Image (cartoon, rainbow, N blue to C red):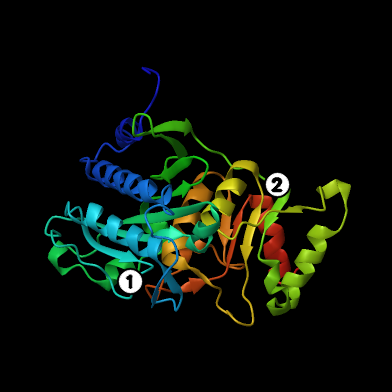
Amino acid sequence: MSNLITIERHILEQQRLFPEAHGELTDLLTDVAFAAKLVRKEVVRAGLADILGFTGSTNVQGEEVKKLDLFANEQIISAIGAHGRFAVMGSEENEEIIIPTNNESGNYVLLFDPLDGSSNIDVNVSVGTIFSIYKLKTSDPTKANLADCLQPGAEQVAAGYVIYGSSVVMVYTTGHGVHGFTYDPTIGEFLLSHENITTPKSGKYYSMNEGSYAQFNESTKKYLDYIKTEDKATGRPYSTRYIGSLVADFHRNLLTGGVFIYPPTTKHQNGKLRLMYEANPLAFICEQAGGRATNGRDRILDIQPAELHQRTPLYIGSTDDVIVAEEFEQGKR
């Protein structure tokens, strides 16, 4: 047991990389880990707790709200907002920004997707929580506002996700590598299991919802034809792996190599995934692990957001694979 490293200990050790740090970010990440434990407790017993299924309402995205979505959202806001470390928060489930009751001393911004892939929970497929942390721009925390949330992804000071699957894993970065922790329910702790994750430069998998093929542009269709064509020199054809839970698809490709693509479609010409709650945090993690993330043309982390719930296409994963997908999207192939 003495060789085991808890997430709290690891976060404290990471803090030493920042001589100017005062421990605030350490506390914030510890809060997020605690909130993840609360969500995990209900995810694993969702069927018994009568929180499967829909609430009968829709969220700001126009999507039906799952009961577990609502529970996860409330738990994260309650567990994290009560400490006053965040001056302002934004959730995929809330139309407007959230100002915690005790925000007088908060110097940070939290943006999060409380339960990504929740449509899969009823069939016991992995779901996840995604989070992103920024420094507050407004000098007075009590005057925190929407502008504090609308920062480019490159301004993130930390980001991560929790995947609730056969085991519960939390992955995070503060800009000094990517580290993963597996939850041990016997002691109630996240323990270091994946240190300094490096994603392969190329992989053999692609993740994409091909059910939308008829809505893809010609460039995307050509790309699909390309990766399905046999060519030993380039390792083609690729195998498809698509779960329909972004966190689960991204986590697999991060570890094994590959590319996740959610391209523009005739129905969602600006993409479907959320820039602030999904693309930015995963792009930060991916780049820290040696990967690449773009909207098909521009680096995700360089995009200046204009809206809290802005959407974007997403090409993310192994660097070489993303570059090839971009070349098709840009008409270079």
- Residue 230: image quadrant is bottom right
Q: Residue at x 56, y 58 (%)?
A: 293
Label 1, label 2: how many angstroms apart (C-alpha)? 36 Å
**Where is residue 16 shown, x and y percent of the image?**
30, 33
Amino acid found under the numbered disc labelled 1: Asn
Between 101 and 229, the one lying in front of the other is 101
Q: Is residue 301 visible to the viewer in this orientation of the structure?
A: no
Residue carrying label 1: 94
- Position of the C terminus, as image quadrant, is bottom right
* Residue wearing tag 2: 203
Q: Residue at x 47, y 64 (%)?
A: 302
Secondary element under disc 1, as helix, strand or loop, is loop
257 vs 333: above or below? above
Q: Are marks 1 and 2 in contact (CB under 8 Å)?
A: no
Q: Position of residue 117 (x, y in %)?
A: 50, 60
Mark 2 closeness class: few <14, some 14–19, many ≥20 residues within 10 Å? many
* Horizontal and vertical percent position of residue 13: 32, 31
Q: Which residue is rendered at x = 41% and y = 65% of the image?
A: 276
Q: Position of residue 178 (x, y in %)?
A: 47, 41
Secondary element under disc 2, as helix, strand or loop, is loop
- In screen coordinates, is 19 left or right of 170? left
Q: Quadrant of the N terminus?
A: top left
Nearest the eye: 27 or 287: 27
Task: Point out which mark residue 44 bears.
Answer: none
- Specify the amino acid type for callout 2: Gly
The tally of labels here is 2
